[in-house]
Image (cartoon, grey):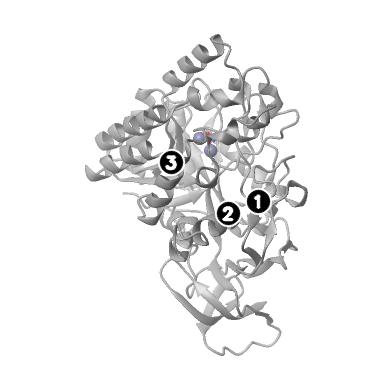
């Protein structure tokens, strides 16, 4: 089956030009002017539209047992949501708890995705405990095509590693050439501040941020930087929410630490006042690290524009308001942490980043696709439009005008954190390895078309 996309404005992290793209089978086989359509090819006219490389979300949670409940999506709903939002590859956090076995966890997470996902996928493998058995299993998991780990410096006794484990996990990563993604918050400070606030009767969602202030996150980053410096491991800080944390990483980068920084869409467009909404509505906006004061948004946009922040993910973690977020009425520490946004990331960053002049189109593509491909061993198969690359393409209509609404979303969650927000662009057609999975903005694809992406370590 071949597909010819004609006259689109091809836009990558580095280039922009009008041309045709021929996809044969799963790959891009020609880019040029006036390309003839092979017999039987589907021809799509992309005049007046952008053609972007498929977007990559490098930080999502789909199967997630967490805080006494489970995240609401499965690969059916999450991959459909990703695709209508322009995301063609998901990197999910595979997160067995400290009490669980790493290899069993990996097999379990894989079974939730394989044969179901409509988009391509891979995992960051959590190291939630480090002992001889886990080390052996991690070596096996890397051989099976995983080239990134995940560690938590937060969530004491559930996912969190102690410092001896952290040191040994980083040493192993360095030996194997695996990059380590890290949730950085000082877990002792979080748990002591939570106890203090609850003891003072401060129980609503608005107290979530004060229980995990900016300096608690910056301290977590600084702590990780020290360990990365000692071990030489390459590290990637997930969901960075504020300028102090960015500066802690930037200072380490100046010292030669191999560190990259991710932010997530919610921090770019929401601030702490959302978690202060009355009648417990703020619970919809509880995630960790928390939404911050508005001034941090400017700092993160600027750090993206200067490329100090490499990637924009979502940290998609969907919990219903009814029955799940409500578990934390009367005690904010029991509100399941997470904001769903896998469907909205690309459109939010385009509308509120590119269209508002905060970042340019190339930075948008770089942060939402290319950098993740490069950092996580997927480039140039993913993350660009080039001969031989996978035909993962997003035809994007910059003239679309519409609003976000929970009623219309594919994500299996009962609210949208962005209800009623205006959008000024949207994917019309989305392909995954040459197959049209979204047409006219609607999912028309096949579940199970998504493949597990085997990756080789690249961080030696
Ligand atoms: O609030 C969040 N971020 N929920 C998902 C788990 C995590 O820490 O990434
Ligand atoms: Zn996290
Ligand atoms: Zn996360």
User: Mark 2 — residue?
Assistant: 348
Return the residue at label 3. Answer: 295
Disc ID at residue 380: none
Q: Is residue 51 above or below residue 173?
A: below
Mark 2 or 3: the one toward you? 3
Is the Cβ of the residue at disc 1 closer than 8 Å to that at disc 2? yes
* Residue sitting at the far left: 255
Picture quarter containing residue 240?
top left
Q: Are marks 2 and 3 in contact (CB under 8 Å)?
A: no
Among the two numbered marks 1 and 3 on one chain, the one whose residue lies closer to the N terminus:
3
Residue 111 picture location, percent across and down: 65, 43
Separation (CA) of disc 1 from disc 3 = 21 Å
* Quadrant position of residue 318: top right
Q: Nearer the viewer, residue 317 or 23?
A: 317
The residue depicted at 23 percent of the width and 45 percent of the height is: 254
- Residue located beneath label 1 in the image: 421
Q: SS at mark 2? A: helix
Q: Is residue 457 visible?
A: no
How far across and down, in percent of the image, does residue 56 sit?
53, 56
């Amino acid at each position: 089956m071949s597909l010819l996309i004609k006259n689109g404005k091809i836009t990558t992290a580095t280039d922009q030009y009008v041309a045709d793209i021929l996809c044969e089978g799963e790959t891009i086989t020609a880019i040029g002017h006036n390309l003839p359509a092979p017999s039987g090819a589907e021809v799509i006219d992309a005049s007046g539209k952008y053609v972007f490389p498929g977007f990559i979300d490098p930080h999502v949670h789909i199967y997630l047992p967490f805080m006494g409940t489970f995240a609401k999506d499965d690969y059916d709903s999450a991959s459909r949501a990703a695709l209508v939002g322009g995301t063609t590859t998901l990197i999910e956090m595979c997160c067995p708890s400290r009490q669980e076995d790493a290899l069993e966890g990996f097999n379990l997470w894989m079974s939730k995705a394989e044969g179901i996902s409509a988009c391509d996928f891979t995992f960051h493998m959590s190291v939630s405990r480090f002992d001889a058995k886990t080390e052996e299993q991690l070596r096996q998991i890397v051989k099976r095509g995983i080239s990134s780990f995940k560690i938590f410096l937060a969530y004491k006794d559930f996912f969190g590693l102690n410092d001896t484990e952290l040191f040994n996990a980083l040493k192993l990563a360095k030996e194997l050439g695996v990059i380590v993604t890290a949730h950085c918050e000082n877990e002792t400070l979080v748990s002591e501040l939570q106890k203090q606030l609850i003891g003072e009767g401060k129980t609503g969602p608005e107290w979530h941020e004060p229980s995990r202030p900016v300096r608690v996150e910056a301290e977590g980053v600084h702590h990780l930087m020290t360990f990365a410096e000692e071990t030489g491991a390459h590290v990637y800080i997930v969901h960075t929410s504020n300028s102090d944390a960015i500066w802690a990483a930037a200072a380490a980068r100046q010292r030669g630490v191999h560190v990259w920084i991710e932010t997530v869409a919610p921090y770019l467009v929401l601030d702490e006042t959302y978690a202060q909404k009355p009648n417990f509505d703020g619970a919809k906006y509880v995630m960790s690290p928390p939404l911050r004061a508005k001034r941090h948004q400017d700092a993160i946009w600027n750090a993206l524009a200067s490329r100090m922040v490499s990637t924009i993910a979502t940290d998609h973690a969907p919990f219903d308001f009814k029955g799940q977020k409500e578990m934390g009425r009367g005690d904010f520490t029991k509100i399941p942490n997470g904001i769903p946004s896998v469907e909205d990331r690309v459109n939010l960053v385009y509308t509120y980043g590119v269209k508002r002049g905060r970042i340019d189109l190339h930075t948008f593509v770089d942060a939402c696709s290319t950098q993740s491909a490069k950092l996580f061993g997927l480039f140039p198969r993913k993350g660009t439009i080039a001969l031989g690359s996978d035909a993962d393409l997003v035809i994007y209509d910059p003239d679309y005008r519409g609003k976000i609404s929970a009623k219309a979303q594919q994500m299996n969650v009962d609210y949208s954190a962005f209800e009623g927000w205006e959008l000024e662009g949207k994917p019309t057609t989305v392909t995954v390895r040459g197959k049209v999975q979204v047409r006219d903005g609607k999912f028309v694809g096949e579940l199970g078309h998504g493949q597990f992406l085997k990756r080789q370590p690249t961080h030696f």
